[in-house]
Image (cartoon, helix red, strand yellow):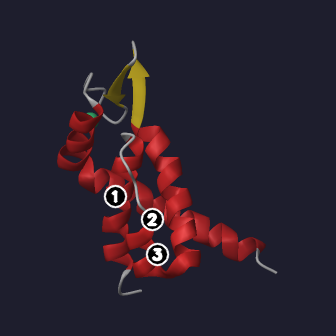
Amino acid sequence: MVAKDYLLEMLVEYTARKATRMNASTRKLEAIAGVQMARVAVEVGDRIAESLVHESRGLPRCSLCGHGPFTYRGLYLHLLRKHYDEIKQLLEEEFEYTIRMLKFVAP
Ligand SMILES: [Zn+2]
C-alpha cells in the first residue's frame, strides 16, 4: 500500500490532537484512505490517544516519558517533537493488528 506511510503520518497528527483535546478532524484521513479504512484508522488513533496522556492534579502529563505537567498545547508539541516515531510505530502495530482481526472475523 503506497499511501500507508502517509496515512500513518496523518494519523500521528490526528492522534496527538485527539490526545491533547484539540480539534481533530477526520477529513484528511478519509481523503487519503477512504471512509471505511479511515474509520478503522480513527478507531486505532482514538485508542492510542488515550494511552498517551494522563492527568495529575488536573494537569496533563506525557504517559510515554512521564514529563509534565504541560498545557494541552505544550503537550501536543511535546508529543510531536519527542515521540513522533514512537507514536507512529504504536499506530502502525495497532492498525495492522486491527486489520488482521477484521479479516479474521469477516464472513
Ligand atoms: Zn514524553
Q: In the rendered image of this protein, does residue 11 appear above or below residue 1?
A: above
Category of crowding for the residue at label 1, using alpha-carbon neighbours closer than 10 angstroms: few (below 14), some (14–19), many (at least 20): many
Q: Which residue is mark 1?
A: 12
| Marker disc for residue 104 | none
| Marker disc for residue 30 | 3
Residue found at x 25% / y 26%: 70
Of discs 1 and 3, which sits in the foreground? 3
Residue found at x 40% / y 80%: 32
| Amino acid type assigned to the residue bearing label 2 in the image | Thr
Closer to the N terminus: mark 1 or mark 3?
Answer: 1
Q: CA distance from mark 1 to mark 2?
A: 12 Å
Element carrying mark 2: loop
Element carrying mark 1: helix
| Amino acid type assigned to the residue bearing label 1 in the image | Val
Residue at the far top in the pictured view: 57
Category of crowding for the residue at label 3, using alpha-carbon neighbours closer than 10 angstroms: few (below 14), some (14–19), many (at least 20): some
Q: In the rendered image of this protein, does residue 107 appear above or below residue 53?
A: below
Q: In the rendered image of this protein, does residue 27 appear above or below residue 87?
A: below
Residue found at x 51% / y 71%: 38
Residue at the far right in the pictured view: 107
Question: Residue 19 occupies which quadrant of the picture?
Answer: top left
Q: Which residue is mark 2?
A: 26
